[in-house]
Amino acid sequence: MITTQHIEEDLSRAYVQAIAARAGVNLALRDRSHDYGIDGTFHQVSYHDAGREESGFSLDFQLKASINAAVDNQHVTYDLDAKAFNSLVERAARKNTCPAILILLVLPENSNEWLALSEAQLVLKRCCYWTTITGAATSNAASKRIIIPRSHLLTPEKVASLIQAVENGEPLQ
């Protein structure tokens, strides 16, 4: 059996795949053998007389999954690995790069509750939240606490609006 961390990662990838499919965007997930901080990319697809094609507007993401995120009425609090935090901060500070967001799948503490299925439905418990990481790099060696508004739920509509913001040159909100 694979590790619990790999199961969490696979569930986060499945969640993002389902969201991307419903959003009608092309999804590229990175090969796990080379992890350089970006786990995947959402690619906008547009329709032209000749058919559908990738528009050239995209949004990169780093994907995390955890049972250790604290969720209250308004926020999700998570201790992000310091290296990952600094990588996203540095990327955000560079001009003319493809924007990148952090996506966090919050899972129930009990692994038996992560997934349920029947002939009628497949249920992946809890959900993904997204955020941008900007500001100053951390000097912490282990982790940096981040706070994500609960309103930053990753939905198909949100993925489409984020890519639309990229196309329009607007901040990701």
Image: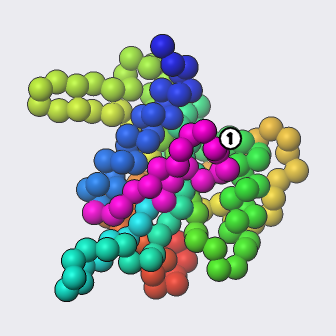
Q: Which stretch did the figure color magenta?
A: 24-41
Q: Residue 16: x percent and y percent? A: 40, 48
In this orientation, does residue 141 appear? yes
| Residue 152 covered by magenta stretch | no
Using residue 62 as the reference point, say whether residue 127 is left or right of it.
left
Task: Spot the residue most to the top.
Answer: 1
Q: Residue 81: x percent and y percent? A: 72, 42
Using residue 16 as the reference point, say whether residue 149 is left or right of it.
right
Look at 38% across and 26% down and name the residue there: 114
The residue where tag 1 is placed is 79
* Along the line of sight, the residue nearer the viewer: 14 or 173: 14
Q: Is residue 62 above or below residue 10?
A: below
Q: Is residue 165 above or below residue 10?
A: below
Using residue 68 as the reference point, say whether residue 108 is left or right of it.
left
Look at 37% across and 72% down and name the residue there: 54
Q: Residue 160: x percent and y percent? A: 35, 68
Q: Is residue 31 above or below residue 101?
A: above
Q: Residue 67: x percent and y percent? A: 53, 30
In this orientation, does residue 72 appear? no
Amino acid type assigned to the residue bearing label 1 in the image: Asp
| Residue 35 covered by magenta stretch | yes
